Image: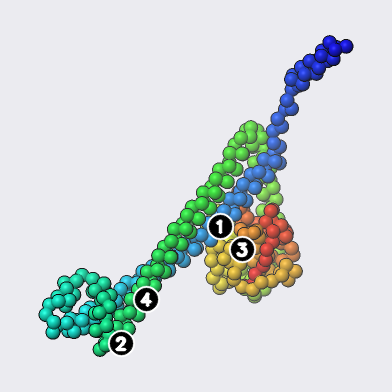
């Protein structure tokens, strides 16, 4: 009996060892398409973050330039005040031989020399206003230097952020291309044909919606009419026309035509205009998606919106939804 049990155990072990592993199932065309779309959407999100960083860099560079100019002017004032007080100090020391006055005449840094408490005490008894002016100018110069250092530091941080976001976006697009090229030729060509077919349907219906739109004299309507004229133009990061757009580039240029100046960033555009509820939308209202915000479109009316969605897509009219992919609707603004 023991031999029989041992034999059965060995047989079971042998069967377990030689059991073939389940065959690996290649991803379906639909799964590949979803992966590519996800990566392209991720790239669009990173590009929008890069738009914000680009604007912040431009702002900081303007501030730094203005601060540098201001600092230079204050430095001139400080030098004039220093030389004026130096002459006063010399006059006060004329009765005591060369002494400190001779040292002052040879000094290349009057400001440092004037930091001597004894010298300032003598000057201050007869020239209080000149001394106050000097100290005030000195404080303004030091404050200007501090702010300039702060802006320079922030500039370095924002440039690093811009580089990270652009690198991440390009990496996502490269991965999307890799996923596509990993398919067999016939599968890849089939997927591309199907994608082209879907995009053509979207384009055809978008053109019909655009042709059917009847606007009014409102600012939002004027901006919307401009955006609808761009139907079929391709998405390109940081583009703002005339034939290539990203999401915030399209809304920026559309509202520019209506006389409203907007920055090229969805995360900053959301700060403009007034907030409106989802149930109170009107044509031309800007719609924002994502946490943090990474997409902006424009309400068309009739439950539709016009947008430049992401790489691989064109300006289109689609249904307004509360979830744009994985991005929740977070608010609307009327300009």
* In this view, 42 is above or below 181: below
Q: Does the CB distance between marks 4 and 1 fall below 8 Å?
A: no
If the image is split into quadrants, where does the N terminus sit? top right
| Residue found at x 32% / y 83% | 133
- How far is the residue under mark 3 from the one under mark 2? 62 Å
Query: Can residue 202 be seen in the rendering of this structure?
Result: yes
| Secondary structure under the numbered disc 1 in the rendered image | helix
Q: Tell me which numbered mark, 2 or 1, is placed earlier along the sequence.
A: 1
Q: Which of the two labelled residues, at mark 4 and mark 2, occupies the earlier sequence position?
A: 2
Query: What is the distance, in whole Å, between disc 4 and disc 1 at their CAs?
Result: 36 Å
Which residue corresponds to mark 2? 129
User: Which one is nearer the viewer's eye here, 103 or 285?
Assistant: 103
Q: CA distance from mark 2 to mark 1?
A: 52 Å
Q: 132 or 238, which lies in front?
A: 132
Q: Give the percent coordinates (x, y) of residue 109.
A: 23, 71
- Closer to the observer: label 2 or label 1? 2
In this view of the protein, can residue 231 be seen by the observer? no
Q: Nearer the viewer, mark 1 or mark 3?
A: 1
* CB-based contact (under 8 Å), mark 4 and mark 3: no
> Residue 136 lies in what quarter of the image?
bottom left
Q: Position of residue 3 (x, y in %)?
A: 84, 10
Say what secondary structure mark 2 lies in: helix
Task: Please tell me the numbered disc located at residue 140.
Answer: 4
**Residue sitting nearer the eye, 137 or 217:** 137
Q: CA distance from mark 4 to mark 3?
A: 49 Å
């Amino acid at each position: 009996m023991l031999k029989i049990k041992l034999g059965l155990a060995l047989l079971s072990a042998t069967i377990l060892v030689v059991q073939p592993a389940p065959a690996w199932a290649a991803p379906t065309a639909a799964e590949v398409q979803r992966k590519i779309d996800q990566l392209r959407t991720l790239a669009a999100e990173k590009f929008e973050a890069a738009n914000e960083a680009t604007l912040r860099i431009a702002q900081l560079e303007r501030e730094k330039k203005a601060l540098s100019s201001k600092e230079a002017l204050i430095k001139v004032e400080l030098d004039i005040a220093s030389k004026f007080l130096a002459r006063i100090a010399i006059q006060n020391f004329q009765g005591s031989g060369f002494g400190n006055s001779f040292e002052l005449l040879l000094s290349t840094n009057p400001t440092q020399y004037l930091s001597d408490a004894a010298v300032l005490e003598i000057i201050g008894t007869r020239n209080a206003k000149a001394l106050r002016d000097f100290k005030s100018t000195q404080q303004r110069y030091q404050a200007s230097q501090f702010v300039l250092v702060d802006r320079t530091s922030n500039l370095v941080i924002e440039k690093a952020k811009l580089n990270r976001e652009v690198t991440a976006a390009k990496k996502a697009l490269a991965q999307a291309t890799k996923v596509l090229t990993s398919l067999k030729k016939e599968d890849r060509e089939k997927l591309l044909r199907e994608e082209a077919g879907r995009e053509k349907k979207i384009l055809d219906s978008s053109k019909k919606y655009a042709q059917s739109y009847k606007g009014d004299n409102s600012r939002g309507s004027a901006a919307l009419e401009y955006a609808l004229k761009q139907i079929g133009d391709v998405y390109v990061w940081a583009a703002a026309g005339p034939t290539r757009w990203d999401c915030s580039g399209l809304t920026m240029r559309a509202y520019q035509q209506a006389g409203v100046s907007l920055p090229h960033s969805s995360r900053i555009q959301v700060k403009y205009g007034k907030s409106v509820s989802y149930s109170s939308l009107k044509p031309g209202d800007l719609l924002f998606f994502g946490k943090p915000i990474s997409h902006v479109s424009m309400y068309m009316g009739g439950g539709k919106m016009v947008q430049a969605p992401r790489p691989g897509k064109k300006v289109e009219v689609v249904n307004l939804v509360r979830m744009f992919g994985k991005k929740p609707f977070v608010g609307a603004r009327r300009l």
